[in-house]
């Protein structure tokens, strides 16, 4: 009878300890993901852009321009929607970058631009 109680107690201890160990192992990658998403969140907001277009011709100076980049955090902080424009031009660019689901470990992005 005592052996049976001890065996049940040991089984319960293993049953409780196993999920706790799994949670602790999952916490380390989750902390890394949170750090990546925190870096992504730092890009949110409206940013002035000083742009340099390198000259492809020797002796010709680089061209300079100014623009605006608007970054909006979306989808629970996992994706950034980016809108970019260059002052005095019809140029518009749009980008989306973030982390793939469910692992959130691989960065992914796509960009598109047009001259209207």
Image (cartoon, rainbow, N blue to C red):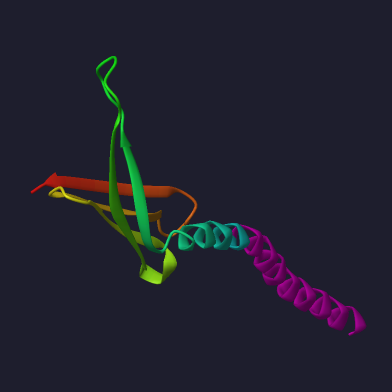
Residue 81 percent location from the top left of the image: 31, 60
Residue 6 percent location from the top left of the image: 87, 79
* Quadrant of the image containing the N terminus: bottom right
Residue 36 percent location from the top left of the image: 53, 56
> Relative to 1, does residue 93 appear above or below in the rendering?
above
Q: Which residues are magenta?
A: 1-29
69 to the left or right of 28? left
* Of the pair 2 and 57, the residue shown nearer to us: 57
* Of the pair 13 and 30, the residue shown nearer to us: 30
* Of the pair 82 and 91, the residue shown nearer to us: 91
Residue 10 counted in the magenta span: yes
Residue 100 counted in the magenta span: no
Quarter of the image holding residue 29? bottom right
What secondary structure is the stretch in magenta mostly built from? Answer: helix
Which residue is drawn at the image coordinates 72% and 65% (left, top)?
Answer: 21
Which residue is drawn at the image coordinates 12% and 49% (left, top)?
Answer: 90
Q: How many labels sit on residues? A: 0
């Amino acid at each position: 009878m005592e052996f049976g109680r001890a065996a049940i107690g040991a089984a319960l201890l293993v049953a409780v300890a196993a999920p706790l160990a799994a949670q602790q192992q999952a916490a380390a990658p989750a902390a890394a993901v949170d750090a990546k998403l925190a870096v992504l969140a730092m890009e949110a907001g409206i940013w002035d852009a000083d742009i340099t277009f390198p000259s492809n011709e020797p002796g010709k100076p680089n061209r300079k321009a100014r623009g605006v980049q608007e970054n909006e955090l979306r989808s629970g902080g996992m994706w950034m929607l980016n809108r970019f424009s260059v002052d005095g031009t019809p140029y518009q660019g749009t980008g989306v970058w973030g982390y793939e689901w469910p692992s959130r470990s691989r960065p992914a992005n796509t960009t598109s631009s047009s001259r209207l």
